[in-house]
C-alpha cells in the first residue's frame, strides 16, 4: 500500500474519532448543566414562601440551563408539605444528533421552615 492510500484511510478515521470526542464532551456538558439546573431549582423552591415556589424554581432552572447552552427547557415542579421535587429536561445542540440530544435530571430538597 502506498503512503497516500494509507493517509486516505487513516485521515477519515482520525477525523471521525475527533468528532465523536467533541460530541461526547458536548453531551456530558449538557447532562451536567441539566443536573445543576435541577438542583438549583429545587433549592430555590425549597426556600420560597407562598405559592411562588414553582415560578421561582422554573425561572432559576431556565437561567442555569440557558447559561449552559440548553434549548427547549421544560421544568416540572412538584410541591409537597415537607419537600419539593423538580424535573428538568432540555436539548443539547449536537453536530450529529442520533436521538441522544435530550437530557433530563431530577432533584429533590426538603422544604425549609422557620420556627
Image (cartoon, rainbow, N blue to C red):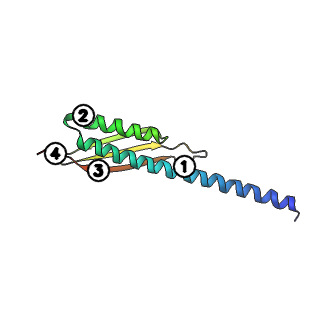
Q: Residue at x 54, y 49 (%)?
A: 26
Q: Quick one: SS at disc 2?
A: helix
What label sits on residue 52 in the rendered view? 2
Q: CA distance from mark 3 to mark 1?
A: 26 Å
Mark 4, residue position: 113
Q: Earlier in the sequence, mark 2 or mark 3?
A: 2
Mark 1, residue position: 26
Residue 57 in the image, given as x and y percentages of width and height: 31, 39
Whether the residues at callouts 3 and 4 have beta carbons within 8 Å, the answer is: no
Q: Earlier in the sequence, mark 3 or mark 1?
A: 1
Whether the residues at callouts 3 and 1 have beta carbons within 8 Å, the answer is: no
Residue 43 lies, with reference to residue 12, above or below; the image says above
Q: Quadrant of residue 6?
A: bottom right
Point out the frontmost of discs 2 and 4. Answer: 4
Q: Is disc 1 surrounded by few (<14), some (14 to 19) or many (20+) residues within 10 Å?
A: some
Residue 87 in the image, given as x and y percentages of width and height: 35, 46
Amino acid at each position: 500500500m502506498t503512503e497516500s492510500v494509507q493517509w486516505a484511510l487513516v485521515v477519515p478515521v482520525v477525523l471521525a474519532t475527533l468528532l465523536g470526542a467533541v460530541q461526547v464532551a458536548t453531551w456530558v456538558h449538557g447532562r451536567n448543566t441539566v443536573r445543576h439546573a435541577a438542583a438549583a431549582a429545587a433549592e430555590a423552591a425549597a426556600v420560597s414562601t407562598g405559592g411562588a415556589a414553582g415560578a421561582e424554581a422554573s425561572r432559576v432552572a431556565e437561567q442555569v440551563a440557558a447559561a449552559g447552552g440548553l434549548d427547549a427547557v421544560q421544568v416540572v415542579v412538584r410541591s409537597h408539605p415537607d419537600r419539593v421535587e423538580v424535573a428538568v429536561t432540555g436539548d443539547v445542540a449536537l453536530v450529529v444528533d442520533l436521538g441522544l440530544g435530550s437530557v433530563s435530571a431530577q432533584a429533590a430538597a426538603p422544604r425549609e421552615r422557620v420556627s
